Image (cartoon, grey):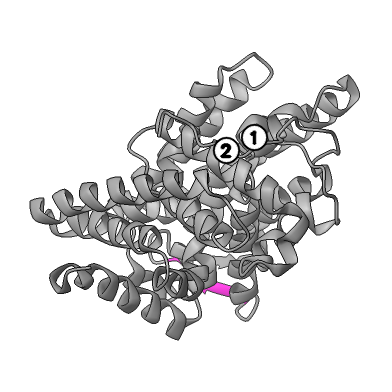
């Protein structure tokens, strides 16, 4: 890479270092795997291009830089091109690099349709790696995803798994519970976040998405519309100007709670709409919620500067932890998924 463009990787290194020093990197989804991805980037150019694209896109939004926006598009295109070529020669030696790039690109896709395409790549790659997941540098991700933690080797993608009425009914009951609890919890949280207009706006969006999904989750919602619901939250760390790693490293309890609730909304949608529950999607957010809860357990109470009240972390984390409990309880079901040959969607 040209020296001038290495600044994007350097910027990402700085950001992750800040998170590491504050012990918050594992809360930030794939950023907790950054060291591994950076090592892969030294051997696979498409991994480096993916990391540069993410960093440039974030800089373009934060600094309103046209140059960074152009660079983000260029590197994103190069990452997808390299990913496509690597998928055509999928092997044990490049599997980790393919998975890293596909997961990283899933946070950068420009719309829900392209997100669906990269999800197919993630699902296919995870399926190809399932029998050798313990050899992967991302073995921790596989272990945390209940498709693979139970040792099953023929797990189906979520969109094919629930074809038995009693299982669907259980899922609907749990989804209704999470919708009701989630809407109430986010309404409470919105009051606490009123001093931060950007975060408060995202929180209201979370509530609106939950309300809409609550009204329609037992209907036949087209796949594209399901992905449209989750899309804004898959790209939050790179595409939203309210995402501040400095604020997160300062360990603001309200920001922790916001992240936990954003993750919990996505997990709730994965419970209600299993078609979007692709590999690592909900499980990384489950891990994020548990990491946040671990950090919050050290302090039982905090004072809210917005509503001037004392809040109990246990009470404020009730909805996110219940979402984790239900998601882990449901789990996927074993069934032949029909994936036999490696492919790469032409739409990417």
Q: Furthest residue to the right?
A: 166
Query: On the rendered structure, is 125 left or right of 254?
Result: right
| Front-most of residues 97 and 288 | 97
Query: On the rendered structure, is 111 left or right of 36?
Result: left
Q: Which residue is mark 2?
A: 183
Residue range (magenta): 300-304
Q: Residue drawn at (65%, 14%), measured in percent from left and top?
A: 219
Residue 133, magenta (yes or no): no
- The quarter of the rendered structure image containing the N terminus is bottom left
Image spot of residue 93 (x, y percent): 58, 63
Can residue 113 be seen here? The reply is: yes
Q: Residue drawn at (80%, 44%), measured in percent from left and top?
A: 331
Image spot of residue 292 (x, y percent): 58, 68
- The quarter of the rendered structure image containing the C terminus is top left
User: Dividing the picture into quarters, in which one does residue 53 lie?
Assistant: bottom left
Image spot of residue 97 (x, y percent): 50, 61
Q: In the structure shown, which secondary structural element does the residue marked by tag 1 occupy?
A: helix
Q: In the structure shown, which secondary structural element does the residue marked by tag 2 occupy?
A: helix
Can residue 200 be seen here? The reply is: no
Q: Furthest residue to the bottom?
A: 21
| Front-most of residues 113 and 193 | 113
The correct choice, above or below, for 145 with respect to 42 in the image is above
Image spot of residue 227 (x, y percent): 50, 30
Q: Residues within 10 Å of mark 1 (few under 14, many from 20)?
A: many
Distance of label 1 from label 2 (alpha carbons): 6 Å
The correct choice, above or below, for 75 with respect to 30 in the image is above
**Majority secondary structure of magenta residues:** strand
Residue 303, magenta (yes or no): yes
Q: Which numbered disc covers residue 179?
A: 1
Q: Residue drawn at (60%, 55%), measured in percent from left and top?
A: 91
């Amino acid at each position: 890479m040209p020296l001038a463009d290495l600044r994007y990787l350097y910027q990402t290194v700085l950001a992750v270092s800040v998170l590491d020093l504050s012990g918050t990197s594992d809360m930030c989804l794939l950023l907790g795997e950054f060291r591994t991805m950076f090592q892969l980037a030294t051997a696979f150019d498409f991994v480096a291009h993916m990391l540069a694209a993410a960093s440039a896109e974030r800089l373009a939004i934060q600094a309103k830089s046209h140059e960074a926006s152009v660079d983000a598009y260029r590197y994103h295109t190069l990452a997808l091109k390299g990913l496509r070529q690597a998928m055509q020669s999928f092997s044990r030696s490049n599997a980790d690099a393919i998975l890293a790039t596909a997961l990283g690109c899933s946070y950068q896709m420009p719309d829900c349709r392209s997100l669906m395409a990269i999800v197919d790549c993630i699902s296919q790659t995870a399926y190809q790696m399932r029998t050798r997941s313990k050899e992967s540098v991302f073995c921790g991700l596989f272990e945390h995803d209940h498709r693979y933690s139970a040792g099953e080797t023929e797990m189906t993608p979520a969109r094919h798994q629930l074809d038995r009425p009693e299982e669907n009914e259980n899922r609907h009951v749990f989804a209704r519970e999470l919708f009701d609890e989630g809407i109430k919890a986010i309404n409470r949280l919105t009051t606490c976040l009123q001093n931060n207009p950007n975060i408060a706006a995202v929180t209201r969006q979370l509530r609106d998405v939950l309300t809409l999904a609550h009204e329609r989750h037992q209907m036949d919602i087209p796949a594209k519309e399901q992905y449209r619901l989750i899309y804004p939250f898959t790209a939050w760390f790179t595409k939203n100007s309210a995402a501040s790693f400095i604020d997160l490293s300062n360990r603001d309890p309200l920001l922790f709670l916001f992240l936990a609730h954003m993750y919990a909304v996505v997990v709730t949608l994965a419970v209600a709409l299993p078609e979007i529950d692709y590999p690592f999607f909900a499980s990384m957010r489950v891990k994020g919620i548990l990491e946040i809860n671990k950090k919050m357990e050290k302090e039982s109470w905090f004072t809210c500067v917005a509503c001037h009240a004392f809040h109990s972390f246990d009470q404020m984390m009730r909805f996110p932890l219940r979402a984790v409990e239900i998601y882990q309880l449901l789990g996927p079901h074993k069934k032949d998924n029909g994936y036999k040959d490696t492919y790469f969607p032409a739409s990417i």
